[in-house]
Image (cartoon, rainbow, N blue to C red):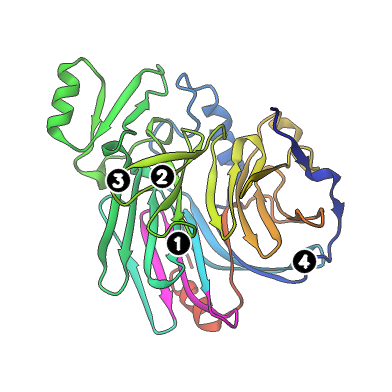
Amino acid sequence: MAIQYEDLSSYQRDPHFYGRLDLILTVKSFDLQAIRARYLKSRANASGASGSVERRAPSTGGVVRVQVEGGRLQSAEVLARLKEPRGIDALLDEQQQLKALALSAENVVHWWHKDQQGLLKHPWFSYLHTVQFHPEDMHRLLISSSGYDYIQETDLKCGEVIFDWLAWEHGFDQGRDPGSGEPVFLTRDAERASVLQAEGKSCMLIQDPPEEAIPTARRAAFINSVCYNRDKPGELLATFFHKGAVYAIERNGSSRELISGLRNPHGGRNYGTGMLATSTAAGKVIWKLPGAERHFDLTTLPGKDPTLGDWEWVQNSLVCGDLIISIDSNRNALVIFEPLGKKLDMIAYPEEWAVQDAAIAPPDESADAWVRSLSEVR
């Protein structure tokens, strides 16, 4: 049975149905055109895997607080400039006030509680993407290290690793050479590398991770988001960019596929009764509900540069009450829509912003001051 997509351009355009939204955005670069050029070039990779084919210097991005109301950005302040910030998460208390904030920047994680702040580093942190607080414990933080297909859960009280998972050791160890398209096996085990080489297989042995980078196109799974599964405590949900799928990962290391057929997905997350995933390169959002699915199509929305052709780039999506907010990097807009009422608005943001992620975060002087203190560029 063919999937029926809801064309968001058919929704009623309304700048007032959602009230005021206070958001913090991570902008991984203030040079969106350079990123577009790299991705368009990568589409010619023999492997078929999107992304960079060689190591590059991290870009300077930023953390931006914005207020959205009445169909436009009412305010936008760059709180800090950092190396490629991507992930962000905020926890709110019962009064909807900010009680915890975390963000990732290239290979470190910064976190804030009202009475304590900290920094996390680890040899297997690279090209960090999402961060998420445990919904019932703000001292537990979940991190996706996309550069090494690695997941880690950390106890913020003591800095100890509670759980970690390396895709290469759980059935996802085969990347591809972007030039030839031939398989390349990834491992951190020298004995495993010797066996592979004896079998005539190409492999990359990573034993000094801070110094050995894996280009995006060569990674095996490219795990670019991980979160707690609210429906099944203890289970994790992860999006595998190269596999085009959302997987459930158990604490015993096993995994199973939940959603497939996506194109370069981001943000597979559980929101109470439903799970949301963004099929980034297809320009679609999938909302999986008990016994049903709804599929939203952003490709007919206005504002896309015609030189981008059929390439779509809906970076990520989040849920806010009855709203879904999608980051459309090819239209330089936050696409806010309400599936129940079939209403929509598009909030333009500056063309040079490569927005990666967003979190609902009411203004908090202490948290904002902390973010400003992190700035690497004054």
Does the rendering let one see residue 376? no
Residue 159: quadrant of the picture: bottom left
Q: Nearer the viewer, mark 1 or mark 2?
A: 1
Three-letter code for the amino acid on which mark 1 is drawn: Gln
Q: Position of residue 89 (x, y in %)?
A: 50, 64
Q: Which residues are magenta?
A: 92-113
Three-letter code for the amino acid on which mark 2 is drawn: Ala
Q: Nearer the viewer, mark 4 or mark 2?
A: 4
Q: Earlier in the sequence, mark 4 or mark 1?
A: 4
Q: Earlier in the sequence, mark 2 or mark 3?
A: 2
Disc ID at residue 132? 1
Q: Which quadrant is home to the N terminus? A: top right
Q: Earlier in the sequence, mark 4 or mark 3?
A: 4
Q: Which residue is mark 4?
A: 18
The answer for how far apart the CA atoms under marks 4 and 1 are is 25 Å
Element carrying mark 1: strand
Q: Position of residue 357 (x, y in %)?
A: 56, 56
Three-letter code for the amino acid on which mark 4 is drawn: Tyr
Q: Are marks 4 and 3 in contact (CB under 8 Å)?
A: no
Determine the main secondary structure of the stretch shown in magenta. Answer: strand
Decide if residue 88 is on the left or right side of residue 353: left
The answer for how far apart the CA atoms under marks 2 and 3 are is 33 Å
Q: Earlier in the sequence, mark 1 or mark 3?
A: 1
Q: Which residue is mark 2?
A: 57
Q: Are marks 4 and 2 in contact (CB under 8 Å)?
A: no
